[in-house]
Structure formats: C-alpha cells, structure tokens
Image (spheres, grey):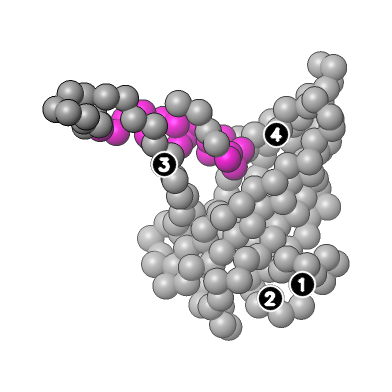
Amino acid sequence: MRVVRGLGLGLDEKAVDAVNQWKFRPGMRNGQPVAVMATIDVNFSLLDNGQKSHWRLSRAEFRAPENAPKPMLVYYSHPQSHNYRKPTLTPVLVELQVDEQGRPQNLWVGKAGMAGSAAEIDSSMTKDLLTAAKLWYFTPSQKDGKAVPSTVTLEFIWAGK
C-alpha cells in the first residue's frame, strides 16, 4: 500500500491505518481469486465536538527547504464553529510558518488568491481559525540534523450545519 497524494500532518499514516483495518473480497476471474489494484480516497472531517457544524481539511501544502522532510502535526486544536454570517463552501486558507521549535508563526487566513487580505471572510471565521492555529504544534523540518523553518498552507472548507 502506498499514499498517492498525501496531506501530511500525520494524516497519511492515519489513512493507511484505517484502510489496513478494512476487509476486502478478492477480485475474481474465471471463478478464481486474482489480485486487483485499487485507488481509495480517504476523506477527513474535523468535527466540532458535540456540534453539528464542522470544518473539512481539503488540501495541505508544505514548502520546506530542499531535501528536508515535511513537518508533522503533533497537536491539533479544532477551530470553533459558530453560526457564521453566511455559510460557504469556498475554501479558506490558513498559511503559517513552522519555526524551529515546531510553533506556528506569521499566521494568515484568507481566501485563495487574496494574499494579504481577509476581506469577504466572516470575521468570526477568521478569528476562530487563527485562535485554533496558534495552538497547533508540529515536529519541525530537519536539514543536516538541525531544525529549520518551513511553510504550511492548509485549505479548509466550512461545511456548515
């Protein structure tokens, strides 16, 4: 089994663990079992404990120094989900730098193509994402045995209620 397009943040390993627990019937040819290749999509929903609204992580992108491994998410604090002014399935980006200690720095929340501006995003949505992201903790990227900063872009969709 291999991950074709990973999210990082430790989610790739969780997807592999989940699929490894599944049971499959073998493919059949002329009444005989045969090996079959399959591509399986694994989706993640970041459910808001006890609430009916939720955030969905739709994409994760990492920009680490050349030949440095991606940072991995060690601790995740879920963004609160309030009754935002207008629910939307428009992706909301959270961009941040992971410093040498694994802490998020230089956080930004906005829509794709709106670098430097959070206009048109409900202010409580921006606040909830920033509040949660400040608590996240990563294992930092390593290069030549030394921790180095990297950049992470996470794309969330608020699926509403």
For this rendering, which residue is in front, 49 or 37? 37
Q: Residue at x 85, y 17 (%)?
A: 144
Assess whether residue 23 is covered by the magenta stretch.
yes
**Cα separation between marks 3 and 1:** 35 Å
Residue type at numbered disc 1: Ala
Q: Are marks 2 and 1 in contact (CB under 8 Å)?
A: yes
**Cα separation between marks 3 and 2:** 33 Å
Query: Where does residue 149 sit, x and y in percent of width and height?
Result: 83, 36
Decide which of tag 1 and tag 4 comes sooner along the chain: 4
Farthest residue to the bottom: give it. 85
For the N terminus, which image quadrant?
top left
Residue type at numbered disc 2: Ile
Residue type at numbered disc 4: Pro
Q: Classify 10 Å Cα crowding around label 1: few (below 14), some (14-19), many (20 and above).
A: some
Which residue does the numbered mark 4 point to in the structure image? 71
Decide which of tag 3 and tag 4 comes sooner along the chain: 3
Q: Nearer the viewer, mark 3 or mark 1?
A: 3
Secondary structure at numbered mark 4: loop
Q: Classify 10 Å Cα crowding around label 2: few (below 14), some (14-19), many (20 and above).
A: some
Q: Residue at x 58, y 40 (%)?
A: 5
Which residue does the numbered mark 1 point to in the structure image? 118
Q: Residue at x 76, y 29 (%)?
A: 141
Decide which of tag 4 and tag 2 comes sooner along the chain: 4
